[in-house]
Image: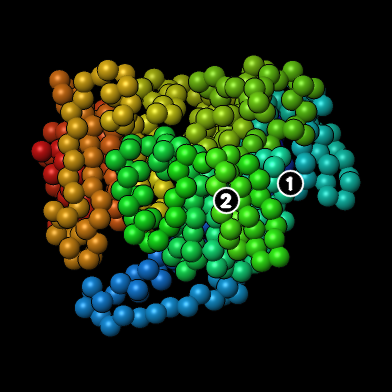
Amino acid sequence: MSRMHFVVIGGGPGGIAAATHAARFGVSVTLIERDVIGGAAHLWDCIPSKAMIATGGAIAFLARSEGMGLNTVEAAIDTNNLSERLASITSHLESNISDLLSSQNVRVIQGTGTLISPKTVRVTTADGVEEDIHADTILLSTGSRPRVPDWCSPDGDRILTTRQAYPPPEIPEHLTVIGSGVTGVEFVHMFTSLGSKVSLIVSRQHVLPDKDPEVAYELEQNFIDRGVKLLKGARSTAIERTSEGVVVKCDDGRIVESSHALLAIGSVPNSDSLGLESAGIESEWGYVPINDFGQSNVHHIYVAGDLSGKLPLSSVSTMQGRKIVEHMMGVQQHDAHRHISYNHAASAIFTEPEIADVGLSQIEAFAEGRKVRVTKVPFSSAAKALINDDTRGFVKLISDPATGVILGGSIVGRHAAELISIIALCVTNRLTVADLRETLFVHPTLSETLADAAE
């Protein structure tokens, strides 16, 4: 009896997780990737941006070292060294992933996969060689790419997409960032830390329009303190090259002149060459709707990652990949976590201070007319924050006043991305404020503020 053949198109976090998990079940797996094993959005966007942010953080730490009882030290950016560092990190991760796939006997094909029928994938390699592969089940996890509007023509020199900025050809003297969502504010933080003057086009009345306004305000104040110019209520309509740089024009008549401009206005799914119609797969604006099991309307074809239109997070994509394989193999799960609860996914923004949240937010609760208990503890009350000479930010906990069940939380401050995992564990497992309060945390640590918020 022949083994089930599982074909994965897209070697990002979701595709890798699914391929390796399926191989452990004894399935024959073929993975097709056209760019980089590990995923372009992950290894060409996410990881380099966080590495550059870490470099900027080191510069910022040295600049304020006097507060730690040291003489102030100045650090200068070395663009060549930074480029080598980013390449080294990406190469190391890609190598690790390739070794993992090899150890699980996953067949990897470097090329483009296109559906030519519901169970046939045509692979075209870079040198034009074609191969038709029959599949029993298929996973589409092709990710996304930076969105470029028709009023802009990135050139990789002065007008950049996010993918052209790791690092840019030169550190901008003055950078205009277009887009004030998660990606946009990370770039503002990154380049101010690296010494650039930054202007930010904010289409709404505050940055991070989908986040808690109190969180957004905290970040805006930090930006203003660092000299960032915020153009609120403005939408970019054109970017033009000049002899000295670029000019960004806004719909309200305002103009920003700078040395460089960077687009951070979202992404579009990589679905245009997948052959969705040939397989009878329904799509909406390029995204493929899925059910709770990750299935498209053609049930033996699953979808994970950005293409599914769910939260564009590597952690979510990885979990989707694993859950999809378990459903494909008929693994019985009788606990409450058989489906992914997307509203329980923790997310973080790697600005300074860091921002992280999970579950129900205060503004969402009020919008729903839901009664909640909100407790907030500033990091300035924590001994560890004083030791770190960084008392910025707070912990905010959202709970049900009747049962004490923790429904969500937000954190602004140092290590917020790490600390939010504790609240995420509580939200996912319906733990209560009493459970959190009775937990013995290490002293002195920032995590103690979570117990304080539960009091």
**Category of crowding for the residue at label 2, using alpha-carbon neighbours closer than 10 angstroms: few (below 14), some (14–19), many (at least 20):** some
On screen, residue 128 versus residue 305, left or right, reads: right
User: Which amino acid type is marked by label 2?
Assistant: Ile
Considering the numbered disc 2 on the image, is that residue within a helix, a strand or a loop? Answer: strand
Asked if 327 appears above or below 86 in the picture, the reply is: above
Q: Are marks 2 and 1 in contact (CB under 8 Å)?
A: no
The outermost residue toward the bottom is 71
Report the quarter where the C terminus lies: top left
Residue at image x 38%, y 37%?
A: 211
On screen, residue 371 versus residue 151, left or right, reads: left
**Category of crowding for the residue at label 1, using alpha-carbon neighbours closer than 10 angstroms: few (below 14), some (14–19), many (at least 20):** many
Q: Which residue is mark 2?
A: 255
Residue at image x 23%, y 44%?
A: 395
User: Which amino acid type is marked by label 1?
Assistant: Arg
Position of residue 133 measured from the top left corner of the image (x, y, whole percent): 80, 33
Position of residue 308 measured from the top left corner of the image (x, y, whole percent): 58, 29
Position of residue 317 measured from the top left corner of the image (x, y, whole percent): 53, 37
Res 86 seen here:
no
Report the quarter where the N terminus lies: top right
Res 229 seen here:
yes
Asked if 58 appears above or below 105 in the picture, the reply is: below
Query: Which of disc 1 and disc 2 is earlier in sequence?
Result: 1
Asked if 352 appears above or below 310 in the picture, the reply is: below
Q: Which residue is mark 1?
A: 34
Asked if 193 appears above or below 230 in the picture, the reply is: below
Residue at image x 63%, y 55%?
A: 247
Position of residue 388 measured from the top left corner of the image (x, y, whole percent): 23, 65
Closer to the camera: disc 2 or disc 1?
2
Number of labelled discs? 2
Question: Between 8 and 364, which is closer to the camera in this rendering?
Answer: 364
